[in-house]
Amino acid sequence: MNQPLLTSVTLHQHRQQAAEASAGISNQAIYICFETKLLHHSATGAVLDWGAGQGLLTQRLQSLKQFHSITAADIQPRPGSIDAPIQWIQTDLNNPLHLEAETFDVIVSAEVIEHLENPRAIVREWFRLLKPGGLLMFSTPNNESLRAILALILQGHFVDFGDLSYPAHITALVRKDLSRILNEAGFCPPQFAFTNVGKIPKFPRHHWQSLPLVSLGGLRFSDNVLTITYKPQ
């Protein structure tokens, strides 16, 4: 009988190394998009930062002063910068959290789902953890941007899913995938928002938004997409 390529120990180590490769940090445009939408939707109550990384979004959630409790979960250990009132759960997010169902009013997840192996299982877990009427917001690379589509045509993969991004980025999704997965799990039809910050193909140090006399953003000129939905009452 053939032996498995990865034991449970080596699988955990592989996932840990992949998480470390991502650095646990997203860019400011993504954090600003989360903050704007959380304020717009008057998000309150108990919030979970799923895949908190170095805790930068977690700290921004705290600074909003809208939530009576903040929980963060990640495969990485608790950063020293996280304040004591914030609960930190160190766990492999490919697996369910050991928490009761309907624990949270809000779940946020910045640039995490593309790192995980089974997006359908993740979305079902989000549905389980949210209270009825709970708000879900998560972001991922925008694989429908002009830059991503050109990379797919010319290189055979989306721009954020090449060899340099592997094994951190392993699951590429577009809006149709996200809508189907959320619908299967029982969520309301999602809305999509964009960071309106996008790199120019072949010139990653420059952004569309820096070009003079034009105003570019939205689906084709944003590097990241934010998905917003609710668990039905």
Image (tube, rainbow, N blue to C red):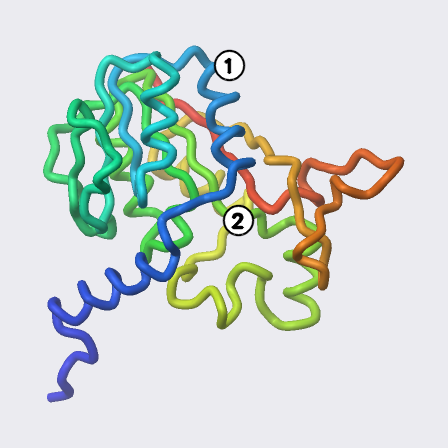
Residue behind mark 1: 40
Q: Residue at x 41, y 39 (%)?
A: 110
Q: Is residue 177 placed above or below 171 in the rendered structure?
A: above
SS for callout 2: strand
- Say left or right for 90 vs 55: left
Residue behind mark 2: 141
Q: Is residue 208 placed above or below 103 in the rendered structure?
A: below
- Say left or right for 116 vs 46: right
SS for callout 1: helix
Residue 68 locus on image (x, y percent): 24, 13
Residue 88 locus on image (x, y percent): 17, 35
Q: Residue 202 sits in which quadrant?
A: bottom right
232, 149: nearer the viewer: 149
Residue 224: which numbered mark, if any?
Answer: none
24, 171: nearer the viewer: 24
The amino acid beneath tag 2 is Pro
Q: Residue at x 64, y 72 (%)?
A: 155
Residue 190 locus on image (x, y percent): 49, 29
The amino acid beneath tag 1 is His
Q: Residue 59 sits in which quadrant?
A: top left
Q: Is residue 51 placed above or below 215 in the rendered structure?
A: below
Quadrant, the N terminus: bottom left
Q: Residue at x 60, y 35 (%)?
A: 194
- Say left or right for 149 vs 28: right
Which mark sits nearer the N-terminus, 1 or 2? 1
Q: Is residue 204 placed above or below 32 in the rendered structure?
A: below
48, 136: nearer the viewer: 48
- Disc 2 crowd rating (10 Å Cα; few below 14, some 14-19, many 20+) is many
206, 71: nearer the viewer: 206
Residue 220 locus on image (x, y percent): 71, 45
Q: Residue 169 sits in which quadrant?
A: bottom left
